[in-house]
Image: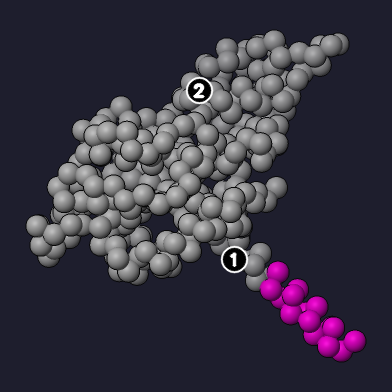
Amino acid sequence: MLIQWYPGHMHKASKELKATLPQVDLIIEVLDARIPFSSQNPMLASIRGDKPCIKVLSKSDLADPNMTQIWQSYLEREQGVKTIAVTIEQPDRIRQLTELCHKMLPDKNPDKLINTLIMGIPNVGKSTLINILAGRIIAKTGNEPAITKMQQRIAIDNNIVLLDTPGMLWPNVDNKNSGYRLATTGAIKDTAIQHDDIAFFAAAYFLEHYADCLVSRFNLPHTPATEQELLSLIGKARGCLRTGGVIDMDKVAKILLNEFRSGAIGRITLESPEMMEQELVELALLREEKEAKKKARKQKGRKG
């Protein structure tokens, strides 16, 4: 499955982003700590130039703490950014962002405003973070992606102005696994996905990396050998049965996804730097093959 979910306001926002960058001193990108690679916007790396950037790993209380540390080290080393892992349960830590902004701009006159662009994919927790920094309800929040629809300028403490952008996904999620991960975390509206398809992807990953969490959460008699067996066992344990004792896979899929998203299964991270580097290599090869086939078709067309 190649997920494509790109509402009209996101296309507009991407154009506004490029137009706004010249006025910006610093960029804050909010990432989901469970998917630090898949939740970052690849367009940003190509257009931010040498502007300082802070990557905020939100929802860190839902992510594997060891993997969060690994990701922070990787991002700071490979991308030359600063990182901070936060959760809405730690408002004081979130407020440290204002001090960090000043530290990253040592040559900036302290009496002058720091114009900061804050961005992130849908449902990553950006609006909640803004409200904590502002000390008041400014941005709409909710568990459904794509709440913020237009840019806002928000003045916060320490001479900092936040330019809030709508949550943006890029037009095509080329890496199909990233698409699945985005859907698993809820960054893509549930109406745009098939729950059982996403749940099978998630189940396979959970079994490989967090099998003990599954056994404990769902009181399973043993570690399932396959994702099909896992979903069937969960269905039986939770009474998700149709007439004739058939497992209702849609209900089971929603249970698995909802309990992952809430953290009920445990603190889980869906990707590692090594995984993403390997997937990028595979994606580059696929693009080369696709381009070669495209050229071959053109040459054949000319000969014809």
Q: Residue 7: x and y, percent? A: 59, 50
Quick one: 259 or 97, which is closer to the camera?
A: 97
The kind of secondary structure the magenta stretch mainly shows is helix
Left or right of 227, for residue 132: left
Residue drawn 77% across the image and 18% down it: 247
In the rendered structure, which disc, 1 or 2, sits on the residue that comes first in sequence?
Answer: 2
Q: What label sits on residue 284 in the rendered view? A: 1
The local secondary structure at tag 2 comes to: loop
Determine which residue is flagged by label 2: 265
Residue drawn 9% across the image and 57% down it: 111
Quick one: 217 or 170, which is closer to the camera?
A: 170
Query: For mark 1, does the 10 Å Cα neighbourhood hold few (<14), some (14 to 19), or many (20 or more) residues?
Result: few
Residue drawn 53% across the image and 27% down it: 260
Left or right of 134, for residue 158: left
Label 1 vs label 2: CA separation?
34 Å
Residue drawn 25% across the image and 39% down it: 134
Q: Residue 184: x and y, percent? A: 57, 36
Q: What label sits on residue 145 in the rendered view? A: none
237 is higher (above) or lower (below) than 277: above
> Is residue 115 visible from the viewing direction of this image?
yes
The magenta span reads: 290-304
The local secondary structure at tag 1 comes to: helix
Task: Inspect the image, locate mark 2, and give the three-letter code of the amino acid beneath it.
Answer: Ile
Quick one: 128 or 216, which is closer to the camera?
A: 128
Left or right of 76, for residue 35: right
> Is residue 106 visible from the viewing direction of this image?
no
Task: Inspect the image, locate mark 1, and give the three-letter code of the amino acid beneath it.
Answer: Ala
Q: Residue 251: x and y, percent? A: 69, 21
Is residue 297 in the magenta section? Answer: yes
Left or right of 93, for residue 193: right
The extreme bottom residue here reads 303
